[in-house]
Image (cartoon, rainbow, N blue to C red):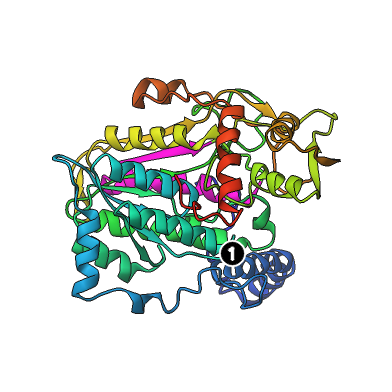
Amino acid sequence: MSHLDDLPSTPGKYKPDKALPYGILHHHRYLRLSKPTLWASLFLALFLFYLLLSSPPTPSRRNLNDSSSLSAKYGGSQWEKQVRKSAHPRSRGGLTVLVTGAAGFVGTHVSIALRRRGDGVLGLDNFNRYYDPKLKRARQGLLERSGVFVVEGDINDAVLLKKLFDVVLFTHVMHLAAQAGVRYAMQNPGSYVNSNIAGFVNLLEVSKAANPQPAVVWASSSSVYGLNKKVPFSEKDRTDHPASLYAATKKAGEGIAHTYNHIYGLSLTGLRFFTVYGPWGRPDMAYFFFTKDILKGKTITVFESPDKGSVARDFTYIDDIVKGCLGALDTAEKSTGSGGKKKGPAMFRIYNLGNTSPVPVTKLVKILEKLLKMKAKKKVMPLPRNGDVEFTHANITLAQSEIGYKPAVDLETGLKKFVKWYMGFYSGSKKKSSW
């Protein structure tokens, strides 16, 4: 992908000229001029090395997965039977889909939608602690009741992935596993490189070696548009000014995907999600923690742009996102490679999945106040330089014409459904698992 690093990966060795007097003089001049460069290169190398390693085992920044022992949880005839049963389509001509991040917000909804229409679905999730694992376990319960088995493992576990591909001939991969969140990247940057880049490469490596290769649909992000001022955001717009490390890793993922498409013939479709919300959502999202804090009488922080304007988002309801994901899977052409060898050009697509109707965050708060029947205690502050952008707005013309994407849920309707779920799930009611 588009990196700003123009430095060579390995500095070349200096070879002094054979003529000693000139060679010695030239050598000393080289060392004198290169010391700042050498120190800069050393710092960069150490920084990249730090990013690629797991974070130290402290309570706040330890490895989020704790997946070192996960390999002991798979294998054996009974396990393989569960895997095959879950992945087996119930309808004639149904897809056989591996869904990574299956216990995540979007992953749960997509997995259940696929299963309900008769496709075979196998989930994969590491149940990390980025947010409360209890919510993920509750989603897992929904999946199990829908007939979807979730393998507990990590996308960086190549042995596990190869095992899954040996047991099941996947027609498609829906790759939703990722380290999410813009602000958390400032606390734990290594987790983003580990999941969004290294993990994605690992999945593509296993996919390109499969015979036959599956078609891969993966989650990119609207964050790739970064500091763009032109709206609405189009797939044709530049995406080389990311505002966060999260956005940079998602942008890198698009470049990596293109490489595997070009070299190995993998059919790849990237979906740029725009602020997804709804029942069973992520607690780190504003609509979610605003609801929580308003109900508890806590003060919420509402950010404004430098010119005192409102920050706005193209909020997209989960059901609309699911329809876009299924549309991308259904229209994905077969990969053209086999066993890592390309046999012809393969499909490569990028789509925006948004609602096309940006809403100011101040209006979001007003809707929540209405639905919760409580007045929010608000503190208005300038938008910090932590990776957040002032606005997002999707141009969905391409997705409409090519995969039949048509968002239908407005923000108030969607938030009403979310609040109903939230009140039921966190009230202690036995109806927590209602869909």
Q: Crowdedness of circle 1 by 10 Å Cα count: few (<14), some, many (20+)?
A: many
State the residue position of label 1.
190
Rendering quarter of residue 413: top right
Hey, what amino acid is under mark 1?
Gly
**Residue 29: x %, y % from top left:** 72, 68
Residue 205 position (above or below residue 310): below
Q: Residue at x 54, y 27 (%)?
A: 355
Residue, x 51% and y 69% (percent of image)? 65
Q: Residue 260: give x, y in percent of width and height.
A: 34, 48
Q: Nearer the viewer, residue 186 or 21?
A: 186
The residue drawn where x is 72% and y is 28% is 363
Where in the figure is residue 38, as x and y percent of width and height?
A: 67, 68
* Residue 372 coordinates in the image, percent (x, y): 70, 38
Quadrant of the drawing holding the C terminus:
top left
Residue 256 in magenta stretch: yes
Task: Write down the region rendered in magenta.
Answer: 244-273
Q: Quadrant of residue 130?
A: bottom right
| Secondary structure found at label 1 | helix
Q: Which of 196/342 is in front?
A: 196
Observer-nearest of 400 and 351: 400
Any part of residue 104 in sight: yes
Query: Is 26 positioned to the left or the right of 355 in the image?
Result: right
